[in-house]
Structure formats: C-alpha cells, structure tokens
Image: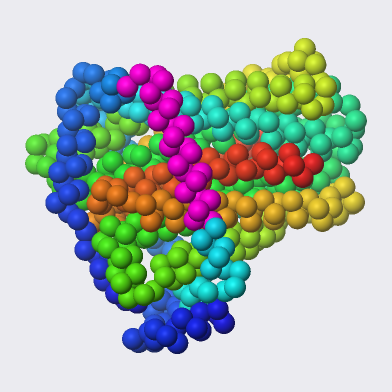
C-alpha cells in the first residue's frame, strides 16, 4: 500500500472507489447465487449435449467440416502436445526415480509402474488439460466471435441450427482427434521417460520397457477417458462460445470461461472415471 | 481511473470484428473442400522454421525487457498500491472456488492413482506419503497454475488488450502516468502473490480431499493417512519445492499475460488472439519451467 502513496498523492482519484464490488453481499447471498448459476449452467450444458447427440445421429452433414475440425483440433495440436508431454514424461520419471530412491533403491519396476500410470491416467488427463487450453480456447473464440457479430443469428435465419452446423462437427472431431493425439502423446511421454531413466538412473531400456503391469482394465479406463474428454471439451467450450454476450470483451470472457470450465470438466470426469475404474477393475 | 476504464471497455470495435471475422471464417470454412488452409501451403519448411525461430526470439526478448521494466518499478517500490489491492481481490479471492474444487478432486485422484500400488504391497501406511509427495511437489502447483493461468492470465490479457486497442494506455501516458507502474507491475505482483497463496490453499485442500477419499475408496482411516504424511518421509523441502515452483509459474503467467495484452494489434480480433496466445504460452512455459526447476533442485 505504501508504495502507491507517492503516485496517488500526485494524481488523486476523482471518487473513492470501493475495493469490493457492491455486488458482494455476504456469504450466503454469494453461495446461493453460485449454486443457482451452477444449476443453470448444468441445465444449459445438458441441453447442448442432448441436442448435439440428437443432431450427430439425425442431423445433416456438411461435407468437409468434420475433416477440417479434425485437422484443426488434432493435427494442429500434435506439435504442442509432443513438446509438453515429452517434458512431462521427463519430469514424472525424474521425480518418481528420486522419490523411490528414498524408500527402495531398486528401480527395475520404474518403467512398468510408469507405463501403467501413463496409460491409466496421466497421458489422458494431462494431455486433455493441454488440449482443453488450446482447443477449448480456439472453439470458444471462434464461436464467440460469430455470436458477437450475429453470424449465429444469420445461421438461424437460414434455418441452420447452430448446434447442428457448428457444434456437431467439433464434437465428432473432438472425440476422434483427442483420442488419436493422446495415444500419440502417451507414446512420446513414455519414450521421454525411457530416455530419462536411462540417462539419469541408468535403467536400461530393456528393463524399462516392461508392459507386465498394464492390464486390460487400465487400457479400458485410459481409452474411456480419451473419449470422455474428447466429447466434453468441445461441448463445454461451444457452450461458452454460444453464450457469449457483449462485444470483444465478451469473447475474451467466453474464452476464459471455456478454458476454465473444460479444465474443470476434465478433472471432474477424471475423478469419476478413475473411481469407476477402481471399482470395476480392482488390481489383483 | 478505474471507472473510466470500466466504461470505455464497453466500447468495442464492432465493424472491424465483423469484416475480419467474416473474412476469416468465410474464407476458411465456406470455401469448402480444402482441409489445409491456404496459408499453410504458401511457405516452405525453411521459411516457417525461420519464422517460428524469430518469433520465439522476439518473445524471449520481449519477456526479458518487460521483466526488467517491472522489476525496476518493484525494487524501489514505485507502483500503484491501490491497483495491487484491487487486482489481488479480483484475481485471488475470486479464484478461490475454482482452486478449491480443483484441489479437492486432485487429492481424490491422487489417492485413486496410488491405490493399486498400495493394494499390491498391502502398504496402506504409505498412501499418505504417496499421495502427499505427488501432490505437494508436482500436481498441486501444476494444476493450480494451469487453472489460474486459464482464469486470471486470460482475463488479464483481455483487459490490458482492450485497453491497448482503445488507446487507454496512450491516454495514461498522455496524463504522465506510467502504464508499467500503474497497470503492469501491480498485476504482475498480484498474479505472483495469488498463485503462491492459491498453491498453499490447494496443497492443504488436496491433502484434505485425499485423506477423506481414502476412507470410502480404500478403507484407509484419515488418521493412518495423516500418519503416512507425517512419518518423516516428507520434509518441509517438499512443500517448499512446490511453493518455489508456484512463484516462477506466477511470474510467467503475469509476464505473458501483460506482454500479450500490451502488444495487441489489429483491433478486437487481436484481443482474442492475444488471449489465446497468453493461455498457450503460459501453459507451455509452466511445463518447461517445471522440468528445469525439478531438475535443478534435485
């Protein structure tokens, strides 16, 4: 506070501006408002989801839209994910090696353990968090700027449902592209981990490449996560884009909300799918 | 000052958005057929590599210059304290719900991921350590930073970008108010402080979530979990490691959002691009920094 005194004395503020927004009316008011906001958003998301499913089955298909969206969401994310999952694999193996050296100095099971964690959770979840950032922001910015410039209303005027025309190709492409990109990034993270283990802890690649711990259940859980995230990210971000209001400021807000909400969706889905996986495929 | 900003933020460059967005959208989508955009085919590999190299160099240079200018305002404090408080409230207090939800679920997920290992060796006493170590050192700071970068970084870039586009930054300069001291340095500090405090809160809530989800999921009492946490395998160094990381992540989020926000060009669509670039660059630099900090501190 003291830092600002010199400047604010030179340029006094015209009116005493409240530090806390006048809308902040107390804990219960805010809790209630948050609750009803959440409820309304859940209903809207559900409605977008149901309509997307309906139009994916019965809707018209625009030629080339699906391929373009796969290119946009998949191919354009490959480089991004390759770099970061590579770094992530290095961090994970490095930390895990350091950690297990404290307890058991035997690192021969490191590779098997790491591959299982990667397949069951980290490849899908961390990859999807990165995709939520890139793809979610892109979708929300695109649809949001269409809403702001009334192009979505123009679509409605042409009897083209925006969900059918805009959301469905992104939804279908999201499932395909996310699954493909995550499988690729899982491979990259594993290779990066292998190289890290080899160069820092002297674990031979032959020892590291051990798939004995990956069961069918792990694969099923991992692939379920890919599909669930691939479906959730486009739906959540399209919803943010479609509910844009205001001008360019609104598009900025929609982008922010898309990133935050799709990341939250990934984390929450991760919890439920992991818990279901633990219940359905208990490790023997 | 704040009131002026609020009012003129509503003024948007609608005509520019319309034409640019329509051209962009129409050109890419409604031409039909071609999946590859035209601009992808135009340049060769060498040219694109060179362009991205130059782009990265420009980014690193711009970040360094901005960091130096911010630090020059911070070390003998010459920034606006009131803006710092306003931004701390807007960034920190308003992010608490997201951080809390993320942390609680993260703790539960860490328990689920540690479960097969623990079940295999029947080492239930170790679950506290297993979940705690991963949460405190890696996942807690990382996920908190990703969430804050999505919420705060993007919002910050959008706000500064709109101010740049509507020439409010130039207006500040015309009034002899230093934009770095008035707008950028308080935001930068606020992001760093917010992320540091959020990581502390997230660590606590994640461990709480882990302790109370270990019961229903694995049948491990919370007390056993706390025992595993405090049995001497975890040190203060592990917590400090995560907190040090969070400071660097916060600095990176603050820098990239302010840099992209102040360097917006091309009207309202430019603001959208800046927001996108902020989110992507902060997420990217968080991962890269994470690696180097983990590696250097070991």
Q: Residue furthest top?
A: A206
Q: Residue, x 39% and y 54% (percent of image)? A: B261
Closer to us: A4 or B273:
A4
- Image coordinates of residue A225 in percent, x first then y, are 53, 31
Start and end of the magenta stretch? Answer: B43-67
- Image coordinates of residue A37 in percent, x first then y, are 39, 60
- Residue A6's place in the image compared with A212, above or below, is below
Q: How many labels does the image show?
A: 0
Q: Residue, x 17% and y 49% (percent of image)? A: B16
- Residue A122's place in the image compared with A157, above or below, is above
Residue A148 showing in the rendered view: yes
Q: Does the magenta stretch include residue B62?
A: yes
- Residue B95's place in the image compared with B62, above or below, is below
Q: Residue, x 78% and y 50% (percent of image)? A: B238
Which quarter of the rendered picture does the N terminus of chain A lie within?
A: bottom right
Closer to us: A37 or B274:
B274
Q: Residue, x 55% and y 43% (percent of image)? A: B285
Q: Is residue B132 magenta?
A: no
Residue A221 showing in the rendered view: no
- Residue A38's place in the image compared with A12, above or below, is above
- Image coordinates of residue B218 in percent, x first then y, are 75, 42
- Image coordinates of residue B67 in percent, x first then y, are 54, 56
Left or right: where B298 falls relative to B84: right
> What secondary structure do most residues of the magenta stretch adopt?
helix
């Amino acid at each position: 506070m003291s830092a600002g005194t010199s400047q604010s004395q030179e340029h006094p503020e015209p009116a005493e501006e409240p530090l806390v927004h006048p809308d902040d009316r107390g804990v219960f008011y805010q809790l209630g408002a948050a609750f009803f906001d959440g409820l309304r958003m859940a209903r809207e998301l559900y409605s977008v989801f149901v309509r997307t499913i309906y139009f994916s089955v019965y809707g018209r298909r625009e030629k080339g839209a699906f391929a373009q969206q796969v290119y946009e969401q998949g191919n354009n994310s490959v480089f991004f994910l390759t770099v970061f999952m590579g770094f992530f694999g290095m961090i994970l193996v490095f930390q895990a090696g350091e950690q297990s050296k404290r307890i058991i100095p035997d690192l021969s099971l490191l590779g098997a353990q790491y591959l299982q964690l990667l397949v069951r959770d980290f490849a899908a979840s961390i990859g999807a968090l990165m995709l939520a950032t890139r793809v979610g922001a892109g979708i929300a910015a695109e649809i949001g700027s269409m809403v702001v410039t009334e192009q979505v209303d123009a679509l409605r005027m042409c009897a083209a449902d925006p969900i059918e025309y805009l959301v469905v190709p992104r939804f279908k492409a999201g499932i395909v592209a996310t699954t493909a990109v995550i499988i690729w990034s899982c491979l990259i993270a594993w290779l990066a981990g292998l190289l890290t283990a080899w160069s820092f802890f002297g674990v031979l690649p032959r020892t590291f490449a051990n798939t004995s711990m990956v069961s069918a259940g792990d694969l099923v859980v991992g692939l379920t996560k890919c599909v669930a995230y691939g479906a959730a990210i486009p739906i959540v971000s399209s919803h943010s884009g479609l509910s844009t209001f205001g001008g360019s400021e609104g598009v900025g807000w929609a982008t922010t909300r898309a990133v935050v909400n799709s990341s939250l969706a990934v984390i929450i889905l991760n919890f439920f799918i992991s818990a279901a996986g633990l219940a359905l495929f208990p490790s023997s | 000052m704040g009131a002026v900003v609020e009012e003129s933020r509503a003024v948007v460059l609608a005509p520019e958005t319309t034409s640019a967005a329509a051209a962009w959208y129409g050109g890419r989508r409604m031409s039909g057929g071609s999946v590859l955009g035209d601009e992808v085919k135009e340049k060769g590999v060498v040219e694109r590599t060179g362009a991205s190299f130059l782009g990265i160099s420009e980014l690193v240079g711009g970040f360094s210059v901005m960091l130096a200018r911010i630090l020059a305002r911070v070390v003998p404090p010459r920034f606006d304290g009131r803006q710092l408080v306003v931004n701390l409230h807007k960034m920190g207090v308003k992010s608490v719900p997201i951080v809390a939800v993320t942390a609680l679920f993260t703790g539960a997920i860490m328990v689920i991921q540690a479960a097969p290992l623990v079940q295999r060796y029947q080492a239930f006493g170790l679950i506290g350590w297993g979940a705690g170590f991963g949460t405190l050192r890696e996942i807690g700071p990382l996920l908190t930073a990703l969430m804050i970068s999505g919420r705060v970084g993007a919002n910050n870039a959008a706000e500064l970008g709109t101010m740049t586009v509507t020439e409010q930054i130039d207006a500040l300069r015309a009034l002899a108010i230093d934009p770095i001291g008035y707008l950028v340095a308080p935001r930068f500090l606020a992001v760093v402080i917010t992320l540091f405090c959020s990581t502390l809160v997230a660590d606590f809530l994640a461990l709480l979530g882990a302790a109370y989800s270990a019961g229903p999921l694995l049948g491990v009492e919370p007390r056993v979990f706390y025992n595993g946490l405090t049995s001497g395998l975890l040190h203060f160094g592990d917590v400090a490691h995560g907190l040090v990381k969070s400071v660097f992540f916060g600095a990176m989020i603050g820098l990239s959002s302010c840099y992209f926000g102040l360097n917006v060009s091309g009207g309202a669509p430019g603001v959208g691009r800046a927001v996108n670039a902020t989110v992507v660059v902060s997420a990217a630099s968080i991962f890269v920094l994470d690696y180097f900090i983990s590696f250097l501190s070991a």
